[in-house]
Image (cartoon, rainbow, N blue to C red):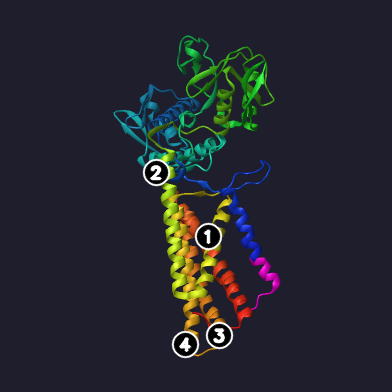
Amino acid sequence: MLYYSRLRMLGVVGICLISALLCLPNFIKSPSQSLPWHQVHLGLDLRGGSYLLLQLDTKTLQHDRLQSLEGEIRQGLLSAHLGYGAIQRDDATTSVLVTPRAESEKDNDRKVLEDLTPSTPGELAISEKDGHFVVSLTKESIRNRAREAVSRSIEIVRRRIDSTGAIDPSIAREGEDRIVLELPGISDPQRIKSLLGTTARMTFHLVAPDPTHAGPGATMLPLPEGRGEIAVEDRIDVDGANLADAAATMSDNQWVVELKFDNKGADDFARITTQNVGKPFAIVLDGRVLTSPVINGPITAGRGIITGNFTARSASDLALLLRAGALPAPLTVVEQRSIGPSLGVASIHAGVISLTVGFVLVVLFMLLFYGRFGLYADIALFANLIMILAILSLFEATLTLPGMAGILLTLGMAVDANILINERIREEVRQGRKPLQALQAGFQRATGTIIDSNATAFLAHVMLFVFGTGAVRNFALTITIGIATTLFTTLVLSRMLIVRWYAHKRPQELPV
């Protein structure tokens, strides 16, 4: 058990040297751009950056659903060869009021309304009031829709942020309708705000027969650059949700955005362009008409382009938004804070001082109480710190103040394991065992306890990392890595140092 072969010793030393090499990029600049120079990234509290609190516009979400519900009711009644006196939305009560055309059709109208297929079970409630039918969205369905919209928005925000090249942003839910966004290293997030403030809901509509007047089933929408308004049919002929890709390209010496549809989008696009040759076709983004070209012929390849006075930046941003997908509802910035680099430097300074002081005190304690064995424990402790930083560097993890606290706590836990081993060896010596027997019994009896205690701590912090967010997650990450490195340095490295010393000196008494 106390025998270390030459190959095993070389393996342990090799791991320590590789760890030291992986730490180097954090302290020196890369001599060549071609080298894989992995570094630990600093979090918002250390590096500085921007903090944004975003809120989802749930009223727009409800309005869109009511507008969709109104269209479903109208289409359902007409498909059943039933008319209606009036169909009105009421955003205040989140309901649609349906007035039957005749008293004799009320039973048939109710049957059509009951046959409506809601987005989720229990979404709709149908009642009758003063001779009208009231189709309402239930409160539970509104809450569920808001929660689902926030979850979808988080993924879309993440895709948009990742496309800008921001390093390790933190995106998390807060409450039922808010999203917290932390951007380390970005002190002026104006471009980020403009990207997130755009819903990027793209739809394709035929222009109304009279472009200057919005008749039934049409809406006046603004044209670009303040050129007035144009009447666009409410019916969505092709949905931007069926976009497969979007890219900014050059065409005829101007920037354009090239679109590529999926199979359904390509089929819809081909059908509309085939049936409406010679008619203007409006491309609408977030309620504004980007362009309204005339359909010159069928487009069956599933591709199209958006023209306009684009710059390279605006075309790239629009393509980015379309690739990331449309937000279910607009996001507004309700709080913004900027953390300057001076505060980040102060945080780093405070964290380094606390880590250094804690490390020095632990080293002195081990030297004072355990002598030579304490020195070996200190060497293993330093190797432990190097290995933690090496693993964080290898995966380019983000380090925050809670993460630094986790590293310091890990060092204390590592010392606990060494203290347990040394005390076990002392106990064996007091019982009269010879040095070799005391060493072997001490390590053997302490190993099981060390593994059990670290295993339970490891599982607890893995769960904390999986289900935690933000600072809690970073704290759990450093502790989890630290537990793995602690087991190696305590049970392998420090034991190897003691075994090599004993094999060289063959002492009659152990210095513990």
Mark 2 or 4: the one toward you: 4
Q: Is residue 89 above or below residue 160?
A: above
For marks 4 and 3, the one nearer the N-term is 4
Does label 2 or label 3 sit earlier along the sequence? 2
Q: Gap between marks 3 and 1, in whole Å?
A: 30 Å
Query: Would you name the residue on which mark 4 appears?
Result: 430
Q: Secondary structure at mark 3?
A: helix
| Disc marking residue 385 | 1
Q: Nearer the viewer, residue 103 or 39?
A: 39
Q: Is residue 146 visible?
A: yes
Give the mark nearer the N terminus: 2 vs 4: 2
Q: CA distance from mark 4 to mark 1?
A: 33 Å
Check the image and report above or below for 129 versus 34: above
**Magenta part of the chain:** 1-12
Q: Is residue 239 visible?
A: no
3D distance between C-alphas at marks 4 and 3? 11 Å
**Is residue 232 covered in magenta?**
no
Please indicate whether residue 187 sits to the left or right of residue 10 in the image. Answer: left
Residue 21 at x, y percent in the picture: 62, 54
Q: Which residue does the image show at 49% across and 75% down from the upper left? A: 371
Mark 4 in CB contact with mark 1 (< 8 angstroms): no
Q: Secondary structure at mark 1?
A: helix
Q: CA distance from mark 2 to mark 3?
A: 59 Å
From the top left corner, tell me how far across and down residue 361 is, in percent.
42, 64
Q: Residue 203 falls in which quadrant of the image? A: top right
Which residue: 41% across, 45% down? Answer: 346
Name the residue beneath numbered marker 3. 435
Q: Residues within 10 Å of mark 4 (few under 14, many from 20)?
A: few
What amino acid type should be assigned to the residue bearing mark 4? Answer: Arg
